[in-house]
Amino acid sequence: MLLNVLYIGIISLYALSVLGYFIDFIQNNQRVNRIAFWLLSIVWILQIVFIVMRTIEYSRLPLMTIFEGMFLYSWILVTFSLIISRLYRVEFLILLVNFVGFAIMTISLTNSTGDVPSSLADLIILELLVIHVVFLLLSYGMFTLSFAFSFLYFFQHHMLKQKRWGKRMGRIGNLSRLAHLSYLFTLIGFPLMLLGVVLGVVWAWVKFEMVPWLDIKVLTSFFILILYGVYLFQWAVKKRRGYGLALLNIGAFLGLLINYFLSSSFSNFHIW
């Protein structure tokens, strides 16, 4: 049970660290970078604790199974990431290495058969599903706030275009601030949803030994990720701002609502 809790804690902190590095990569935010680094440092320490505990439990070095090999591979990637982040400023490399490490550590669950009791394996799979759902719900919350600011931008833009001045406009806020807040919440929501989808894919494979790639819920989830990815690309890379980007964000959120409420009616795999 302790190893189970430790494993889930490692995955959760690792996911938060990847989220931090993603935000730092897009925004070049030193404060977020430091938080992500310390979270990754905690993950590294907990991974060592996990390896030591497993060594004591099985009275051997944890190198004999695919699960153990993938876990150690993930630990090596975390080690390299910590060293690189202290010596160099290569944000994309650090983000990529940590995303691969997170994916490998999560996928290692698919190869844990026989390494742990079946009851404990079932509990791990259930908790993996819980994390998957929590991450997606958090991303939906971020996207909802992002939509709200984009809608206010849309409303304020039309008020200005029609030259309808009044106290209401001052209470809404200026356009640049509304656009920036909308972007910030999308910036947080996107990696949360991406990590949630990755965890969902791993859970489906562990539970059913297959991934329903053609399920309508799965397809629309990837489509929503692409829409929000385009939004972030337009903002961060193309440096585009303004009314068109607000409309894109509003459209992406409407797609998210369709994904949440309607696709489940046509899905044979998801219940929500």
Image: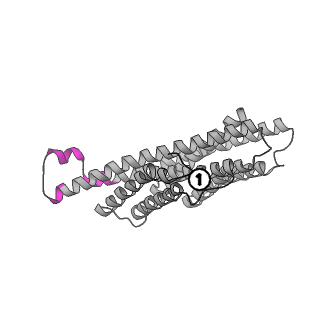
- Where is residue 257? Give x, y as percent: 40, 51
Query: Looking at the picture, does residue 166 appear above or below residue 6?
Result: below
Q: Answer yes or no: is residue 42 visible.
A: no
Which is nearer the eye, 224 or 50? 224
**Relative vertical location of residue 239 with respect to residue 22 in this rendering, above or below:** below
How many marks on residues?
1
Q: Is residue 146 visible?
A: yes
Q: How is the image coloured?
A: one colour
Task: Using the image as rendered, state which of residue 81 and residue 158 is in the foreground.
Answer: 158
Q: Is residue 177 magenta?
A: yes
Quadrant of the drawing holding the N terminus: top right
- Residue at (66% x, 55% y) in the render: 210
For residue 142, side relative to residue 9 (left or right): left
What secondary structure predominates along the stretch shown in magenta?
helix
Q: Amino acid at mark 1?
A: Val
Work out whether residue 116 or residue 259 is closer to the camera in this orientation and state it: 259
Q: Position of residue 59 (x, y in %)?
A: 87, 38
Q: Is residue 22 left or right of residue 43?
A: left
Question: Which residues are the magenta region?
Answer: 159-179
Q: Residue at 70% of width from left, 47% of height from top?
A: 109
Residue at 14% across, 58% down: 162
Q: Which secondary structure, mark 1?
A: helix
Residue carrying label 1: 198
Image point (82%, 39%), residue name: 55
Q: Residues within 10 Å of mark 1 (few under 14, many from 20)?
A: some
Whole-percent x and y of residue 71?
73, 49
* Coordinates of residue 82 in the picture (x, y in percent): 64, 51
